[in-house]
Amino acid sequence: MPLYDYCCRDCQLQFETLVRAGSAPVCPRCGSAALDKQVSAPVPPGKSKAIIASARRQAAREGHMSHYSAAERNKVLRQN
């Protein structure tokens, strides 16, 4: 599910929401479907690496190691 930024034409609220395939988003404030899709700001490079590292640590704690290479799995398992 992609995350999109919208601006409501009726109440001018700017918000972001996950959009499922085949569904139309509505404004959380007024319920209007008259929305303009906004251009999302890119994530700064430093933050995206930190987010990925955090997600990988969380996955490792939960035992989901399938996205790690064999060398990375061994290194993470030795640290825990």
Image (cartoon, grey):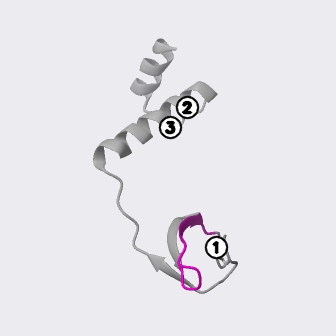
Q: Is residue 5 above or below residue 50?
A: below
Residue sitting at x 65%, y 79%: 24
Rendered residue at 70%/78% (across/down): 31
Q: Amino acid at mark 1?
A: Ala
Of residues 5 and 64, which is closer to you in this image?
A: 5
Vertical comparison of 60 with 47: above or below: above
Q: Answer few, some or many: residues within 10 Å of disc 1's Cα (few below 14, many 20 plus, some between 14 and 19).
A: few
Residue 56 horizontal side relative to residue 24, left or right: left
Q: Quadrant of residue 74?
A: top left
Amino acid at circle 2: Gln
The answer to which of marks 1 and 2 sits earlier in the sequence is 1
Say few, some or many: other residues with alpha carbon within 10 Å of mark 3 (under 14 / 14 to 19 / 20 or more). Answer: few
Q: CA distance from mark 3 to mark 1?
A: 25 Å
Tell me if label 3 and label 2 are in contact, CB under 8 Å.
Answer: yes
Which label belongs to residue 55? 3
- Res. 21 mark: 1
Per the model, the C-alpha gap separating discs 1 and 2 is 28 Å
Q: Residues within 10 Å of mark 2 (few under 14, many from 20)?
A: few
| Residue type highlighted by circle 3 | Ala
Residue linked to disc 2: 58
Q: Quadrant of residue 13?
A: bottom right
Quadrant location of the N terminus in the rendered image: bottom right
- Tell me where the magenta segment starts and ends, as one range: 8-19
Whole-number angstrom distance, CA of label 3 to CA of label 2: 5 Å
Q: Position of residue 62 (x, y in %)?
A: 63, 29
